[in-house]
Image (cartoon, rainbow, N blue to C red):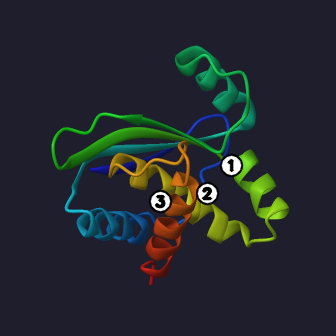
Amino acid sequence: MITFYSEDITLPAIDQAKVSDWIRRVAATYGKRTGDISYIFCSDEKILEVNRQYLQHDYYTDIITFDYTAGNKISGDLFISLDTVRTNSEQFHTPYDEELHRTIIHGILHLCGINDKGPGEREIMEANENKALAMRE
């Protein structure tokens, strides 16, 4: 079950049924099925609090993914800072809606086993994000 929540911020205007279907289709391309996935949309202040409390990181970020995947069933809690998504869309000169969906699928790709911290991994992640974004419609 894929659910969408907001904490200290207004829930973004996304078509939850279409986004959930898209997430399932993307996961299936990696041989995965979706379990319990919760999106928690929040502010920069909330994501900073989560980052400090659970990861001991003292900085803002667009997404934090808590992975509860078991086998081929992906599950997790995904915190997304809409403030940082907006900042990123301005910085990268991309439409807000595109940046939001890129961030939404970024967490799913992590749950599917794609990383972005090691050498060359950021480029692999970006290529997979672009492939997933092309599947949206």
Q: Amino acid at mark 1?
A: Leu
Instruction: Quickly name the residue at label 3.
Output: 105
In front of the other: 122 or 66: 122
- Badge number at residue 23: none
- Where residue 52 appears, as percent x and y from the top left, is 64, 18
Circle 2 crowding by C-alpha within 10 Å: few under 14, some 14–19, many from 20:
some
Instruction: Quickly name the residue at label 1.
Output: 82
Q: Earlier in the sequence, mark 3 or mark 2?
A: 2
Q: Amino acid at mark 2?
A: Pro
> Do we see residue 80 in this rendering?
yes
Q: Amino acid at mark 3?
A: Ile
Secondary structure beneath dot 1 equals: helix
- Badge number at residue 12: 2
Q: In front of the other: label 3 or label 2?
A: 3
- Labels 1 & 2 near each other (Cβ < 8 A): yes
In front of the other: 15 or 87: 87
